[in-house]
Image: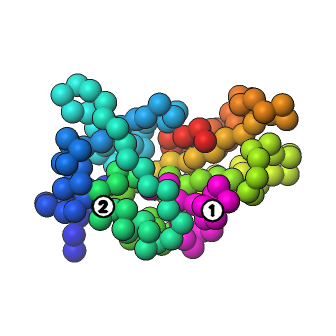
Amino acid sequence: GGPARGEAADATPTDEGRASRGGLAGECDSRVCSWSKMRRHELGWAAGHRLTVVEAAVETLDSALAAERAGADRIELCVNLSEGGTTPGAGLIASVIGRTKLPVFVLIRPRAGDFVYSDGGFGAMIRDIEVAGRMDVAGIVAGALTADGRVDVVRPRYLGEGTAGRPWTCN
């Protein structure tokens, strides 16, 4: 029963939450690098203007379901939010994707602390993106800094290549 993932249902709490913000959320925000998966989940435009996407950062299935009921437009799934968030396990990813209709973006961050990663940490990020991609996530959230604290614009390109066309939000 019920609508397929990404399809609208009549008078659901999610629809009511979106209506209270003036319509469906936009298909992009300033941090998203690609849009194809967002289109699949029917996020669009209103009167020719982009609208804000309300993203809920959650670390449990119950929190994801609560965010959906409250009208969130998408989920950023992670664990260890109290430490800034790290990559969730495959079981949690599968549970959230299977139980919500919202697009699920997965945080790819191998450890808490700074965003300066060793080659080993960066390799783990690439493997985590491959795993998440096989699970049909809507998008990836990831980023890195250089040793001097600047945004690393070189190595994350390899992360983007592993997303298989999914949106990539720079974190």
Looking at the image, can residue 6 be seen? Answer: yes
Q: Residue furthest front?
A: 82
Which residue does the numbered mark 1 point to in the structure image?
Answer: 82
Write down the residue under mark 2: 70
Residue 34 in view here: no
Give the x, y percent position of residue 112.
73, 57
Q: Quadrant of residue 133?
A: bottom right
Please report the residue visible at 63 percent of the width from the left and 62 percent of the height from the top: 82
- Disc 1 marks a residue whose amino acid type is Ser
Q: In the image, which disc is placed on residue 134?
A: none
Q: Is residue 127 left or right of residue 6?
A: right
The N terminus - image quarter: bottom left
Mark 1 burial class by Cα count in 10 Å: few <14, some 14-19, many 20+: few
Pointer 2 local density, CA inside 10 Å: few below 14, some 14–19, many at least 20: some
Mark 2–mark 1 Cα distance, whole angstroms, equals 22 Å
Q: Amino acid at mark 2?
A: Ala
Residue at (60, 61) in percent of width and height:
81
Question: Which residues, given as a range, are shown in magenta?
Answer: 75-93
Closer to us: mark 2 or mark 1? 1
Colour mapping:
rainbow
- Image coordinates of residue 93 in percent, x first then y, are 53, 66
